[in-house]
Image (cartoon, rainbow, N blue to C red):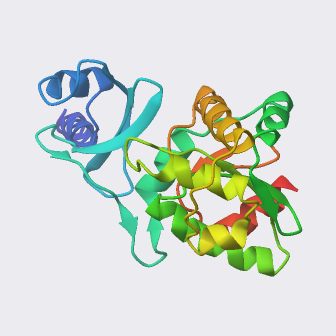
Amino acid sequence: MRFKGYIWIAGLFLWLSGAAGACPTPQKVQQLLRNLTPGNLKILSVRPSPVKGLCEVTLRQGTRKGVTYIDESGRYLVAGRIIEIAKRRDLTGERISELNRVKLTPQQLQKLRQYVAFSAGKGPEVFFIIDPDCPFCKKAERILWQLIQENKVRVNVVFFPLEQLHPRAKQKAIALICEKKGFEDLVAGYQGTKECREGKDKVEEGARFVKSLGIRGTPTYVFPSGLTHSGVLSREQLLKLLKNAS
């Protein structure tokens, strides 16, 4: 009896240990956050995060998915990003990109090609959807420009000006098309004022089409396989994705 008692106590201890390290359910998190989040925000899943003691909460507002964190007890919400210091990896950013990745059909890719403002480089192809005034886009442009000069990528630029954030972005995009400028001018921060019907139509119709694909932010990369990635890609990440797409 004493031996059986030890087994029962050990089993109870293990059960309690497992329970203590468990993440709360999506229903529980939805209830916990009901006074902190908008009514149209839906908790999709909760799972252990890369950081011990923190749980990753996947949520959706409209068509966009995001990530936040909560501790295992459900007492603390941690709104921030997890960075893997040694590898300089933004794990939160990678997860958000993965959640919002869209696979385009060949027909959609062909339609997207109609709205290319200009192309540059030789090699595997990528569509580069940008706002000319987006600071993250400028960082991405510099990385791509180096690869273009090395003939490691062919970049097709599609403008998607976010006018609420950057009121002059649309004008700059139109001018770049109307004045027959290219990627080097884009990287240099060219600011023209010329307008033409071709430029206006390509920017406005292109922006509407991009939005219809579920793309909401810049920069966004679209690969020939139909896979998309929102957010700046490092040189290494780009080369890996281009290789897989070819």
Q: Residue at x 37, y 47 (%)?
A: 165
* Residue 102 higher or lower than 217, as above or below: above
Q: Quadrant of residue 144?
A: bottom right
Q: Is residue 204 visible?
A: yes
Number of numbered callouts drawn: 0
Q: Is residue 58 left or right of residue 95?
A: left
Looking at this view, is 20 or 144 the one in front? 144
**In the picture shown, does residue 219 fall above or below 25?**
below
Q: Position of residue 188 (x, y in %)?
A: 59, 75
Q: In the image, what residue occupies the spot 24% across and 18% down?
A: 39
Q: Which x, y percent locates residue 71? A: 20, 45
Q: Is residue 127 above or below residue 121?
A: above
Q: Is residue 235 visible?
A: no
* Residue 238 appears left or right of 139: right
The quarter of the rendered structure image containing the N terminus is: top left
On screen, residue 236 above or below 199:
below
Q: Residue at x 63, y 74 (%)?
A: 143
Residue located at (57% from left, 37% from top): 215
Looking at the image, which is closer to me, 154 or 189? 189
Asked if residue 5 lies left or right of residue 235, the reply is left
- The picture places residue 11, in percent across and down from the top left corner, at 26, 37
In this rendering, would 188 be left or right of 93? right
Q: Quadrant of residue 241?
A: bottom right
Quadrant that contains the C terminus: bottom right
Q: Position of residue 94 (x, y in %)?
A: 51, 54
